[in-house]
Image (cartoon, grey):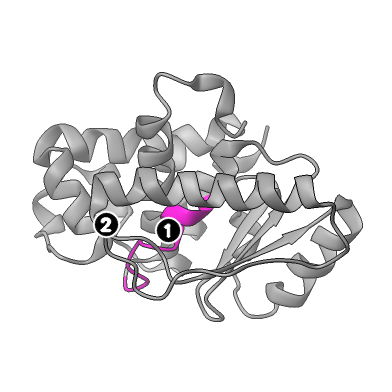
Amino acid sequence: MIYPNKCEVSFLTSATRDEVEKASSWVKYANKIINDNFGIITSFDVIICRGRWEMEVQVISRKSQSLFFMYNDTKFVGITDYRLGEIIIRYDIARFGHYLHELLHGIISNKHPHQLREGFAWYFTLKLTEGYRYVRPSYPSWVDTLYVYPVNRLAEIVGDEFLKDLAVGKASIQYDLLPRDIQDLFLSEEVFYAKKRYLKRE
């Protein structure tokens, strides 16, 4: 098992022993699943907050750091800050799948554009929870269109093992030979979201 620097779990507000144990065990179990499938885990620290207000404070304080932060797909139940190496999870409404989703973000190469990181995180979250759908994060239909469908097609072309290596930065691909919707995932974030913005209207 590869532990780069074991991630720390901390609460922004007071928590009971049961709450601390539950959050810590979910982080530990999500990391075990990720390690079993990728051979690595994240070194990002996990910060647990509670309630809408605490989460909004975290989102607002980080929004200025990234133009594309508004495209967080778990509706701010969980967010990953690559710049600070932190994962924030809203304890009171998070399912196990939110922990898994964000911890997957923590191992995906930050050299990929935002939309490709989201695509990988969603693809592997859904893949790893296939037999346990009740633990999955809920998400709007445009997430399928923007992220999941193109990465599914990419997986059909290259296979899951290569896709894992690509996600963590151990492999590269000549993306200009791929179908157009997959190529779009490799565009700059500005261009990608300018092209796809209309898909968020529900």
Q: Which mark is residue 96?
A: none
Which quadrant would residue 153 be assigned to in this image?
top left
Crowd tier of the residue under label 2, counting other residues whose Cα lies within 10 Å: few below 14, some 14–19, many 20 or above: many
Q: Magenta span has 49?
A: no
Cα separation, mark 2 vs mark 1, equals 18 Å
The image position of residue 108, as x and y in percent, is 35, 61
Instruction: Kindly identify which residue carries mark 1.
Output: 192
Image quarter (top left, top right, bottom left or bottom right) of the C terminus: top right
Q: Would you say residue 118 is visible in this rendering? A: no
The image position of residue 94, as x and y in percent, is 69, 41
Element class at badge 1: helix
Query: 110 above or below 88?
Result: below
Instruction: Kindly identify which residue carries mark 2.
Output: 167
On screen, residue 17 versus residue 194, left or right, reads right
Q: Amino acid at mark 1?
A: Phe
- 77 or 15, nearer to the observer: 15
Crowd tier of the residue under label 1, counting other residues whose Cα lies within 10 Å: few below 14, some 14–19, many 20 or above: some
Q: The magenta stretch spans which residues?
A: 102-111
